[in-house]
């Protein structure tokens, strides 16, 4: 499939039919950049053809976002308009699907006061806390995707002219999402089956712990709670409908025990957080909590992230991705967590998905905490995978099994 417009339409169709798996008469909410208006309209067109009752769009604009940070006083960032949450809750309660298009300029806010960014991030997280329950508990279908924007494309491909950079990024996105293949839908069905085989094995083993080691001095022991659940490929919403939360996705993931993480881990790719980059950093844990950290780039941003709330200094996710994943093999650093996390094993600071423990979606916050499930306003993935990463799982009867060797699956 060589025609760009055909691939573009195929991508939009894939997001609607496989990503969200939109049902007849279901509303759809799309959050996306105004720079990508043509593609958002294409998503809407495919959604209506699939039978959507309504398509509502939340527009964002990098230029206006930056102007606000440059000119608005701090008190503006300390308040969250209630109507923004009300809109999302309204559609969530109507059973809508939610597509988020992540495509911001990684360096958009590099000259903005870090404190203003951290206050804004915390305010937004608090304001959307009730809504996030609908997605993090898989009550509604949701799907995160990306499209090229000028600022992002020029960051990834900074040695070519803007037009060429955008084309190269589109090509990379089509390849990563399997849109470049003759039958992307079939390719995704096959891919989901592969990930489900891994989750089946891991769920049957119910490992007590995972031990991560690498030549970069990573040495981390992660305990897993009883009745944890590994997931990968497709999720299932409260209506029993399958959907794919991330496109692309190469991971299988679960949650760690909140107080069961000890040791040190080193990042292997940059983390784009709130329009700023955090890079070349290490984090040390004791009894689950971050006890020490240091970043050569963005140390103040990392500190503010970790200081968001009590739960932001604990882990909420462990995810396994082979070093040979298609995104990793592209040898491209995307400066976009959706893509970079699917090129590398990663961990997440902050909130755990309640669906990653048996019955978690029906537990109260107190019950989840007693089960070892972390809660926080944030959920931020950071990449730790390398070509020599080793992960050894230990079962409850003391058996040790090599899960990853030299950055690849060993099971």
Image: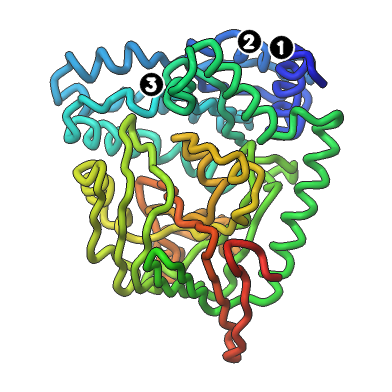
For the residues labelled 2 and 1, the Cα–Cα distance comes to 6 Å
Q: Residue at x 48, y 13 (%)?
A: 161
Q: Residue at x 41, y 47 (%)?
A: 379
Estimate the x, y position of residue 359 in percent, counting from the top left.
59, 63
Determine whether label 3 and label 2 are within 8 Å by CB.
Answer: no
Q: Is residue 390 above or below residue 282?
A: below
Distance, label 3 to label 2, CA atoms, is 24 Å
Q: Bin the neighbour count of mark 1 within 10 Å (Cα to Cα): few under 14, some 14-19, many 20 and up.
A: some
Which of the two marks, 1 or 3, is nearer to us in this view? 1
Residue 193 in view of the camera: yes
Q: Is residue 179 above or below residue 218?
A: above
Which of the two residues, 233 or 112, is positioned nearer the viewer here? Answer: 112
* 314 displayed left or right of 215: left
Question: Which mark is in front, 3 or 2?
Answer: 2
Numbered disc 1: secondary structure: helix
The residue beneath circle 1 is 45
In this view, 112 is above or below 149: below
Reading the image, the residue beneath label 2 is 41
Mark 2 crowdedness (10 Å alpha carbons): few <14, some 14-19, many ≥20: some
Closer to the chain start, of discs 3 and 2, is 2
SS at badge 2: helix
Q: Which disc is residue 83 wearing?
A: 3
Q: Secondary structure at mark 3?
A: helix
Give the image location of residue 43, x and y in percent.
67, 17
Q: Quadrant of the C terminus?
A: bottom right
Q: Are marks 1 and 3 in contact (CB under 8 Å)?
A: no
Q: CA distance from mark 1 to mark 3?
A: 27 Å
Q: Residues within 10 Å of mark 3 (few under 14, many from 20)?
A: few
């Amino acid at each position: 499939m060589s025609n760009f417009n055909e691939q573009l339409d195929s991508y939009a169709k894939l997001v609607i039919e496989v990503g969200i798996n939109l049902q007849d008469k279901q509303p759809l909410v799309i959050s996306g950049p105004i720079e990508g208006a043509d593609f958002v309209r294409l998503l809407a067109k495919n959604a209506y053809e699939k039978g959507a009752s309504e398509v509502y769009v939340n527009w964002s604009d990098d230029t206006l976002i930056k102007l606000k940070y440059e000119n608005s006083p701090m008190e503006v960032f300390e308040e969250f308009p209630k109507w923004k949450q009300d809109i999302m809750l309204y559609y969530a309660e109507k059973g809508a699907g939610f597509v988020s298009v992540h495509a911001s300029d990684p360096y958009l806010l590099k000259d903005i006061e870090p404190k203003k960014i951290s206050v804004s991030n915390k305010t937004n997280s608090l304001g959307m806390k009730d809504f996030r329950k609908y997605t993090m508990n898989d009550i509604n279908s949701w799907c995160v995707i990306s499209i090229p924007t000028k600022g992002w494309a020029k960051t990834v491909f900074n040695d070519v002219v803007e037009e060429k950079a955008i084309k190269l990024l589109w090509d990379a996105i089509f390849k990563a999402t399997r849109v470049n293949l003759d039958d992307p839908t079939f390719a995704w069905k096959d891919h989901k089956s592969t990930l489900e085989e891994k989750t089946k094995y891991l769920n049957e083993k119910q490992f007590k712990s995972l031990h991560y080691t690498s030549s970069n001095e990573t040495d981390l022991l992660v305990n897993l709670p009883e009745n944890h659940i590994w997931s990968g490929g497709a999720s299932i919403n409260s209506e029993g409908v399958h959907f794919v939360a991330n496109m692309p996705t190469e991971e299988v993931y679960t949650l760690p025990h909140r107080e069961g993480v000890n040791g040190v881990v080193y990042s292997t790719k940059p983390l784009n957080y709130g329009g700023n980059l955090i890079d070349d950093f290490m984090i040390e844990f004791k009894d689950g909590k971050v006890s020490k950290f240091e970043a050569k780039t963005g140390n103040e941003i990392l500190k503010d992230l970790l200081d968001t709330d009590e739960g932001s200094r604990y882990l909420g996710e462990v995810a396994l991705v082979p070093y040979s994943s298609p995104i990793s093999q592209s040898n491209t650093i995307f400066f976009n967590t959706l893509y970079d996390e699917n090129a590398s094993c990663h961990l997440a600071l902050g909130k755990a998905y309640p669906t990653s423990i048996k019955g978690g979606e029906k537990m109260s916050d107190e019950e989840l905490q007693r089960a070892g499930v972390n809660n926080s306003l944030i959920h931020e993935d950071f990449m730790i995978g390398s070509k020599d990463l080793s992960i050894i799982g230990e079962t409850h009867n003391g058996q040790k099994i090599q899960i990853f060797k030299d950055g690849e699956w060993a099971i």
